[in-house]
Amino acid sequence: MVQIGLKKASNGKDDYSVATFRRIGDFDGEQLANIKSYADGFRGQIKMLLQQRMLDDTNHSEELPTSVDGSTAYQRTDEELNYGVTGN
């Protein structure tokens, strides 16, 4: 388990935040099995969401954004319709 925090920093001109990471524990046994089961279910939901998004984009591939003067501002390629959905 990792705790994520923010720490204030400054470069003399601007103040900003820096992410900090601290290991605060490990999971094992039944805890680890429960987390893996949850992650696998979540992974399946994300895979279905990405597949649906890919289908939606394929069905709407002719609807391209236009610029202010009405000309086509962006041409989508077949490679850009791939959202990285794999068989896993």
Image (spheres, rainbow, N blue to C red):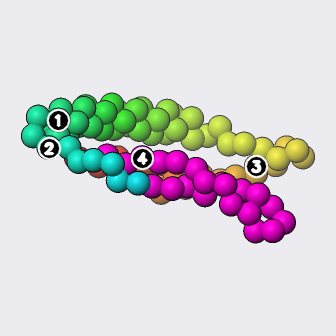
Q: Is residue 27 above or below residue 74?
A: above
Q: Which residue is mark 4?
A: 3
Q: Nearer the viewer, residue 64 or 47?
A: 47
Q: Which residues are magenta?
A: 1-21
Tell me the mark number nearer the camera, choosing from 4 and 1: 4
Q: Which residue is mark 1?
A: 31
As helix, strand or loop, the secondary structure at mark 1 comes to helix
Q: Is residue 38 above or below residue 18?
A: above
Q: Earlier in the sequence, mark 1 or mark 3?
A: 1
Residue 13 placed where, x, y %?
Answer: 84, 66
Real-space CA distance between mark 4 and mark 1, rounded to the nearest whole angstrom: 18 Å
**Residue 5 in view in this figure:** yes
Check if mark 2's residue and mark 1's residue have beta carbons within 8 Å: yes
Real-space CA distance between mark 3 and mark 4, rounded to the nearest whole angstrom: 46 Å
Q: Amino acid at mark 4?
A: Gln
Q: Which mark is residue 73?
A: none
Q: Nearer the viewer, residue 83 or 1?
A: 1
Q: Furthest-right residue in view?
A: 69
As helix, strand or loop, the secondary structure at mark 3 comes to loop
As helix, strand or loop, the secondary structure at mark 2 comes to loop
- Residue 85 included in the magenta stretch of the image: no
Real-space CA distance between mark 4 and mark 2, rounded to the nearest whole angstrom: 18 Å
What's the magenta bit mostly, secondary-structure-wise?
strand
Real-space CA distance between mark 3 and mark 2, rounded to the nearest whole angstrom: 54 Å
